[in-house]
Amino acid sequence: MTKAEAKLPVAILVPGHFNDHAIGRIDKAFQRVRIERADPSLVTGEMREAVRGIACFGGINAAVIDALPNLEIIANFGVGYDSVDAGHAAKRGVMVTNTPDVLTEEVADTTIGLLINTVREMYAAEKWLRDGDWVKKGNYRLSRLTLRGRTIGIFGMGRIGLAVAHRIEAFGLPIAYHNRRKVEGLPYEYHATLKGLAEAVDTLICIAPGGASTEKAINAEILSALGPNGVFVNIGRGSTVDEAALAAALEKGAIAAAGLDVFADEPNVPQALLDAPNTSLLPHVGSASDHTRRAMADLCVDNLISWFGQRRPLTPVPETISVKPRA
């Protein structure tokens, strides 16, 4: 343990299940307070007085923040923090941190794997082999789709979006993107609207964050604009997709295929998407390697240690960047 990690007399609330490596480090540096879930009705009087920090996978709403009057920081495990009410935290003078950068390359790798799996039907082909159909029935069918000749659109050109774009370049495919605003210096074609992007490409990769501004942004209109040869891949947040509209588009042939790593109500996946033969579905494993999750855990806890030891955050989210430590 470094000098900066010397045990601090600070209570850190950890709701529900949490990363084992992060828990080990929290236990060494702080007093961990466990709670079954992030529910203000479970906050005891002792917790109200003692808790100054939260380490979590998200799920911290305004009511939880208000139940902890001495709360100073919420250290979110993950780059996405849409389920943390960062705006309310800022009003209460509570810092919110996340874990950017350390998962960028892993998620970008997963995105490319999911794209290829969706287009070339790798899972179905492997199942054909494992089920013995290669011996009994012969070669697996030719894949209807290919990456050759495709044009890629990226919805959300942040850190991960840029890493995905760099990988796509190696395939020799043209790239376009849509963000709230144009990113200066990028060589890719920018579209001011999501519909404009969908109309210009035949492969749409969603890496957009969750939240009210992107809620069901991928709807029937966008999928129709993508077209019957279209492929949709979502590695960002399930809330960005109208899943009923997506299932209908897949069934009717409005688009050709979809690859999804995230869903609106995880771990519950709509039966229509499970039944669709033209989907490739993953259980939210974008950053799920030992290497990357350990790095995320370290950054999550490092934010707590830096805040209480040096009175500064390492990776504050934009909403709380101006929050100052309490005296």
Image: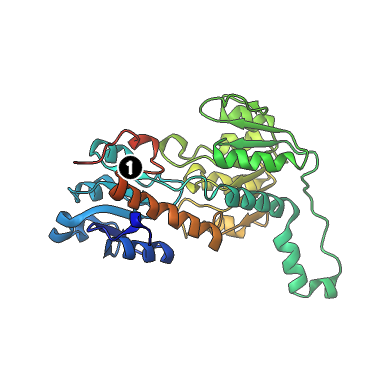
In percent of width and height, residue 106 lies at 59, 52
Residue at image point 35% right, 43% down: 313
Q: Residue furthest front?
A: 3
Residue 210 against residue 266 in the figure, above or below: above
In percent of width and height, residue 34 lies at 28, 65
Q: Residues within 10 Å of mark 1 (few under 14, many from 20)?
A: some
Residue at image point 23% right, 39% down: 92
Q: Is residue 199 left or right of residue 306?
A: right
Q: Amino acid at mark 1?
A: Arg
Q: Nearer the viewer, residue 186 or 22?
A: 22
In percent of width and height, residue 287 lies at 54, 55
Residue at image point 31% right, 37% down: 87
Q: Nearer the viewer, residue 102 or 260?
A: 102
Color encoding of the figure: rainbow
Q: Residue furthest right?
A: 138
Q: Which residue was labeled with disc 1?
A: 312
Q: Nearer the viewer, residue 41 or 19?
A: 19
One can see residue 85 in this view: no
One can see residue 7 in this view: yes
In which quadrant of the rendered image does the N terminus lie? bottom left
In which quadrant of the rendered image does the C terminus lie? top left
Residue at image point 50% right, 58% down: 293
For mark 1, give the secondary structure.
loop
